[in-house]
Amino acid sequence: MIHRCFVSRNINLLTRAFIIIILYYTYVRPLLEYNCVAWSPHLKRDIELIEQVQRRFTKRLIGLSVYSYDERLKLLNLDSLQYRRIRFDIIMCYTRSPAIAEGPRDAGVPVEIW
């Protein structure tokens, strides 16, 4: 849908994939990740359907259709949506566990998740 909304005759603008990726980050990815901690798909077909949105998007970018999905993610510096859901689950468990969140009282060392 983003590709249809931003049509331009300027070829230089169309070859700038980072503009379209910013639009993807802004408009599409939040919809795919909305409430993923509460509703994390566990069926393989649901996971594949959600991942297929990102797969199709990256494939439609100019010059990237010849690469595999994993290579496109590396080239665009993106994570798979399944990886991001797992990461959000870990962060949620970390922040909701009082023993882990408080940490040792006498250590005084800040703990980073990622």
Image: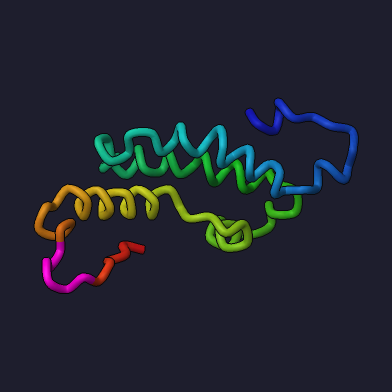
Name the spot of residue 29 as percent of width and height, x first.
50, 39
Q: Is residue 96 left or right of residue 54?
A: left
Q: Who's the residue at 9% across and 58% down the image?
A: 99
Q: Who's the residue at 59% across and 39% down the image?
A: 24
Q: Who's the residue at 33% across and 54% down the image?
A: 87
Closer to us: 5 or 102:
102
Q: Who's the residue at 32% across and 44% down the image?
A: 44
- Work out whether 4 lies above or below 59: above
Q: Is residue 91 magenta?
A: no
Q: How many marks?
A: 0
Task: Tell me, yes or no, if residue 68 can be seen here.
Answer: no
Magenta stretch: helix, strand or loop mostly: loop
Q: Quadrant of residue 21?
A: top right
Closer to us: 41 or 26:
26
Task: Tell me, yes or no, if residue 8 can be seen here.
Answer: yes
Name the spot of residue 58 as percent of width and height, x first.
61, 47
Closer to us: 44 or 78:
78
| Magenta residues, start to end | 103-108
Closer to us: 30 or 66:
30
Q: Quadrant of residue 45?
A: top left
- Work out whether 5 lies above or below 103: above
Q: Is residue 106 magenta?
A: yes
Name the spot of residue 3 as percent of width and height, x first.
70, 33
Specify the quadrant that holds the C terminus: bottom left
Specify the quadrant that holds the N terminus: top right
Name the spot of residue 6 as percent of width and height, x first.
74, 30
- Work out whether 9 lies above or below 69: above
